[in-house]
Image (cartoon, helix red, strand yellow):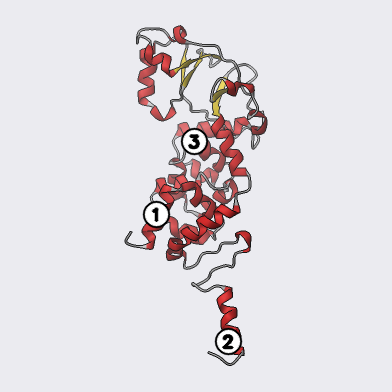
Amino acid sequence: MNSKNDLVRSFIEAHPTEAARILERQREGDVLRLFEDLETETIASVVERMNDHAAADLMDRLETGPATRVMAAMPFRAMAILLRRMQSKEAVLDGLPDEVVSGFRLVDRFPDRTVGASMNPRALTATDDMKLGDVLSAARRYPDRVRDVFFVVDREGVLMGLSPMRQILAAPADASLPDVMEPVRHTLSPYVTLQDAGDAPGWRYSSELPVADGEGVLLGTIGLVDIRRQGNRDSEYDHASEKALGELFRLGFSAFAGGLHLEADGDPEIEGGQDEGHEDEGNAKKESGHE
């Protein structure tokens, strides 16, 4: 490492979750100065792991251009959760692709902390009249939208079944999708809370469940890992581990911010490299007549 700045960047890139826990407790101005020296993808990886409200406040402080680029680099589900909390939401939406905007408008209809608000409406689906070769071609065009299963819909968007990717890959390319289609054992309503959705029996069969409306139209999908991640973001952090990580992180962060202000467990604030304990010691010496 050539500098403390290199240490900070390396730490953030290797440990984005731990970095998020620390940064969300710092002054916004200090964090924004740190972001000036980071790649957009690195910033996005940290912001998506921060507390929703802290992250939204931070993004609102950024200019519209940089904020839009950070949001575009985030996974859709994380971006949508954060975007609905931002005051600059509409300005950022103006700079995002139409497909992303339409997906966000869909999830934004549903109450906070529900399946509908947290689902991914952009997961790749297939219609029941497709050949498997066509399904694989679509998967190659949109690899970031492929999951372990393809949810199968009819031309009206009504959920018909699912096809595991492993079965699609093993079957002939000219076979029809219904040849490898299985029934859907469980669907989620978009109005179900995330807490209740985490207890759904469907997780015994799949790590990704479909979200459908009352007419059976597929709205999106949600994974158990997404529900658990949101629960972790909402819960209190382990302050003991944060304190230990903070000691490591402050080595480099002070190079950007000029001082680190940790507040967990009653730690003294550090300003300009001197803490309150040293100040008190110096005052005591002066009062006793010793310099």
Q: Amino acid at mark 1?
A: Arg
Q: Where residue 56 sits: x, y (%)?
A: 56, 48
At mark 2, the secondary structure is helix
Give the residue type that dot 2 points to. Answer: Lys
Hey, what amino acid is under mark 3? Phe
Q: In the displayed structure, would residue 48 be above or below residue 275? A: above
The secondary element bearing badge 1 is classed as helix
Mark 2–mark 3 Cα distance, whole angstroms, equals 58 Å
Which residue is under mark 3? 76
The x and y percentages for residue 9 are 39, 54
User: Which residue is nearer to you in this view: 45 or 129?
Assistant: 45
- Can you tell which quarter of the image residue 137 is in? top left
**Residue 82 visible in the shown view:** yes
- Identify the image quadrant of residue 45: top left
Sort mark 3 into few (<14), some (14-19) or many (20+) by Cα contacts within 10 Å: many
For disc 1, the marked residue is: 9
Q: Give the residue drawn at x 57%, y 67%.
A: 269
Observer-side mark, 2 or 3, equals 2
Which badge, 3 or 1, comes first in the chain's sequence? 1
Q: Residue shown at 50%/41% (left/top)?
A: 93
Residue 24 visible in the shown view: no
Q: Residue shown at 55%/72% (left/top)?
A: 275
CA–CA distance in space, label 3 to label 1: 25 Å
* Label ID, residue 285: 2
Q: Are marks 3 and 1 in contact (CB under 8 Å)?
A: no
Coordinates of residue 197 in the picture (x, y in percent): 64, 28
